[in-house]
Amino acid sequence: MRNILFIFITFLSIVWSAVSHSSEVEKITIQLKWLNQFQFAGYYAAREKGFFAEEGLDVTLQERNLQTSQIEEVIAGKAEYGVADAGLVLERLKGRPVVLLAQIFQHSPLVLIALQESGVNKLEDLLGQRVMFDNTSNEIAILAMLKTLPGGLDALQLVPHSYRLEELQEKNIKAISFYRTTQPYWFQERKTPIKLFDPRDYGIDIYGDNLFTTEQELFNHPERVEKVVRAVRKGWKYVFDHPDEIVDLILAKYNTQNLSGEQLLFEAEQTRNMVLPDFFVLGSYDQLRYKKYAELFVELGFSTHSYI
């Protein structure tokens, strides 16, 4: 199995030395990992500000079908590119032909949320309780954090995710997984105090959203891959230089969730804290961090080997 961390670097050296003279517009699809929101602002900007078009790309941005995995959609050929997170490593460890292209979020926004009134003050208070999260590689940071509990996941009552925050207020569950970039605003609006359990506080600092593709796309269309990455990086740079404009853009063209401007501005500020564009080159990543993730997945029993 070829190394997910080095395969793209090798191809970039080839692509950068080549000059494409093709004027043909190429149609591609990027599979998002969730519904439209500021989380994908860089892709909206790349499309609406013409960065994709400058590269000769006609791009469809596809919201996630919550009944399927965005990674599976790309592997199945329903999209050429997708947005995943560090769980992509686990898929690679399973032998899936996925390739990391660019790291956008330097930290995962995934947290567990509990109501302050619930009496859940520390992670151990969840033992024996009903906890709602996506028990797949999509939420590997939460999985790894809960695995640190005595008894691990077996010590919890795992509830399939309904994606309804009301489950907490209805007292159907004690904690629910969501992004700290979005859902806390819902409770803030309702003046409901909450407790956040962030995997980073438990020594689990997992990368968040990235851009990925398949080995087939990389080998068959290396120049197109480079064009996509370049446009996406331009898009994210534009986002953090013009956040208010992008919020207006989402409200006008990508607001399938009927979010308010205030919600999106909250998410914009929190997203900046995950991407850290003032401290990291957009799209960059540390190969050693990914190696540590692979080793962690072995340690926690998600994989039998750490070679990626």
Image (spheres, rainbow, N blue to C red):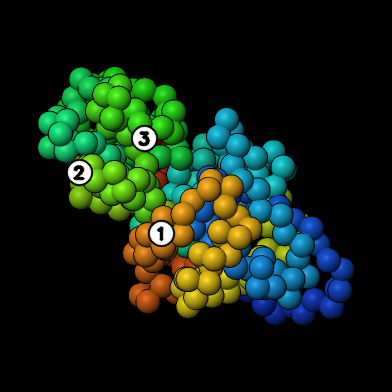
Q: Of callouts 3 and 1, which one flags the residue occurring earlier in the amino acid sequence?
A: 3
Measure how far apart labels 3 and 1 are at the Cα level.
19 Å
Residue 49 seen from this side = yes
The foreground one among 182 and 146 is 182
**Residue with the mark numbered 3:** 165
Residue 144's disc is none
Whether residue 214 sits left or right of residue 40 in the image: it is: right
Closer to us: 137 or 111: 111
Q: What residue type is labelled 3?
A: Leu
Percent position (x, y) of residue 115? 21, 36
Q: Which secondary structure lies at badge 1? A: helix
Within-10-Å neighbours for mark 1: few <14, some 14–19, many 20+? few
Percent across and percent down for residue 145 are 27, 39
Of the numbered discs in the image, which one, if any, rests on residue 193? 2
What residue sits right under mark 1 in the picture? 262
User: Between disc 3 and disc 2, whose residue precedes?
Assistant: 3
Q: Which numbered disc, 2 or 1, marks the residue that appears first in the sequence?
A: 2
Residue 108, image x and y in percent? 37, 52
